[in-house]
Amino acid sequence: MCEVSKCKVCGRTHNSRGDVIDNTDGEYPEITIVGYCNECWAKIEAERDAEEKAKLDALEEAVKLNPTAETYYNCGYEARRLDAYKALAYFNKAIELDPGYVEAYFQRGLLYRESPEYSGRLDDKAEDGRPVTDAKKAIADFTKVIQLEPDNACAYYRRGGELDTLGRRKEAIEDMQKAFDLDGDDYINEEIVWLFTRWGIPVEDPEGNYAEVIKAARNIN
């Protein structure tokens, strides 16, 4: 029996791929997992895109009247998922006007990281159509953030992830350790432990004893 879910919107049964399946005969009597079928999710995405486009349009009008680093940054932030190229241009302009704009460097770094939540592309695409990460540019931006804000745990964490994509594992571990030392935030710590597990670093207590995990990782070369 395949794994099935119940759509939060329409209530229909769907498989793990989001395809609606017939359950009129009660083949799946007890469905405890809820999610979204493809049809409903597409509608949600379309509505979200329309809302974000309207917000971006308003911000672009605002930047014409008041072209500051902040207004350009606001446009870039809103454009991230709609159009990566446009977001990049706005962040570039914000940094041009204010070379010390920490958040602009950080968000541009995330764009170069090209996370799955962003659409658009920055350079070439992989054969399957996904955007290709420019890890070196992302590292440069996160490094700039660290130079401007030495206690920015998120920048260390993000830079560590990009260093790993380049095979620079030891440097990546050092950045993750630094992020842990600075932050103590459970979300970042959980992500660090997950990465360490993926990297084959022993995680003896994945239930929350992050300090012990980090301590053990310091002995990994």
Image: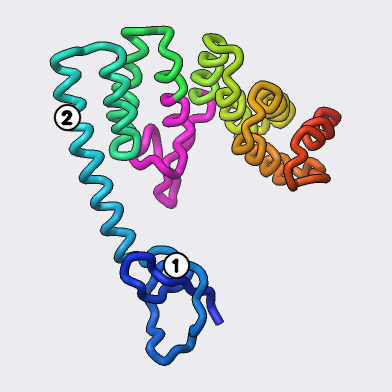
- Residue range of the region highlighted in magenta in the rendering: 107-136
Q: Residue at x 18, y 25 (%)?
A: 60
In the image, residue 3 lies at what x, y percent? 53, 74
> Mark 2 falls on what kind of element?
helix
**Coloration of the structure image:** rainbow
In the image, residue 194 lies at what x, y percent? 67, 44
Q: Nearer the viewer, residue 65 or 17?
A: 65
Give neighbour class at mark 1: few <14, some 14-19, many 20+ (Cα, 10 Å): few
In the image, residue 80 lies at what x, y percent? 34, 34
Separation of marks 1 and 2 at Cα, in angstroms: 36 Å
Q: Nearer the viewer, residue 140 or 72?
A: 72
What is the quadrant of the N terminus in the image? bottom right
Residue 211 picture quarter:
top right
Q: Nearer the viewer, residue 138 or 25?
A: 25
- The label shown at residue 58 is 2
Q: Residue at x 56, y 10 (%)?
A: 147
> Mark 1 falls on what kind of element?
loop
Residue 183 horizontal side relative to residue 26, left or right: right
Residue 195 picture quarter:
top right
Q: Amino acid at mark 2?
A: Ala
Q: Is residue 149 above or below residue 138?
A: above
Q: Amino acid at mark 1?
A: Arg
Mark nearer the N terminus (1 vs 2): 1
- The label shown at residue 17 is 1
Magenta stretch containing residue 130, yes or no? Answer: yes
Magenta stretch containing residue 166, yes or no? Answer: no
Residue 98 horizontal side relative to residue 27, left or right: left
Q: Is residue 41 above or below residue 123?
A: below
Q: Residue at x 53, y 21 (%)?
A: 142
- The label shown at residue 99 is none
